[in-house]
Amino acid sequence: MYLKMILAVFVVGAAIPAFSQVTPTATGGGLPLSVGIGYSNYHTDWSGRLGGGTVWADWNFYQRPSFLHGFGLEVEARDLNYGRTGSDPKLRMDTAGGGAIYTWRHYRKFHPYAKFLVGFGSIDFSSSVPDYTHDSRTVYAPGGGLDYRVYRNVWVRGNYEYQFWPSFFNHHALNPNGFIIGASYDFRHIH
């Protein structure tokens, strides 16, 4: 499963330079990339809550034709393995995915956004079934939040995400959901 996550991040990361062949507009220079790190806390829909680290990268199309303004791509990876509040001492959830993000950039310091990501999910758990303590799924994750500029290229992010892990036990979907708080660095030149 970790190989799949690494491969997914590598493929999306390798595709990012393909967008850099367009001449930038006069609104700003630098890479249209922001990279962030944060803390996640999720209700697992299995056994209580879990916390852990999250990393993300956003590639924005604000230097592209006007119909693409606000649109971008996001990749995100999360490891929920700490602060268990439920009864399963082995519960761990990892996700990695990517997808579309739309950011409303009409305010100088506030950027609300909505996103829809698709990726891989891995879950470890206690089980009474021998040799069945791990499973993985394709995960669908709509979400949204707000980025707030605290200093030049440094932004603070608050995010909510609701995940769909389809066809789990007896065709029941697992629906973890939770919040992320973190900070990111925007690599474009801010004027």
Image: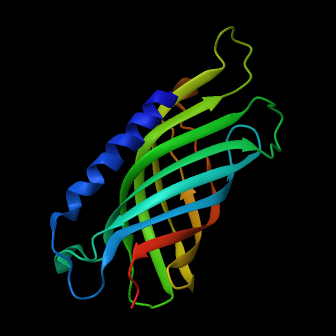
Q: Quadrant of residue 184?
A: bottom right
Which color scheme does this rendered protein use? Answer: rainbow
Left or right of residue 2: residue 180: right
Residue 138 percent across, percent down from the top left: 44, 36
Left or right of residue 63: residue 170: right
Up-down: is 91 above or below 181?
A: above
Q: Nearer the viewer, residue 87 or 183?
A: 183
Question: Residue at coordinates 15% horizontally, 69% vertically from top-left?
Answer: 22
Residue 154 percent across, percent down from the top left: 55, 77
Residue 135 visible (yes or no): yes
Up-down: is 103 above or below 79?
A: below
Residue extending furthest toward the top: 130
Left or right of residue 71: residue 4: right
Up-down: is 125 above or below 186?
A: above
Q: Quadrant of residue 87?
A: top right
Residue 4 percent across, percent down from the top left: 43, 31
Up-down: is 159 above or below 15?
A: below
Question: Residue at coordinates 38% horizontally, 82% vertically from top-left?
Answer: 189
Residue 167 visible (yes or no): no
Q: Nearer the viewer, residue 182 or 145?
A: 182
Residue 151 percent across, percent down from the top left: 57, 85
Question: Residue at coordinates 16% horizontally, 76% vertically from top-left?
Answer: 65
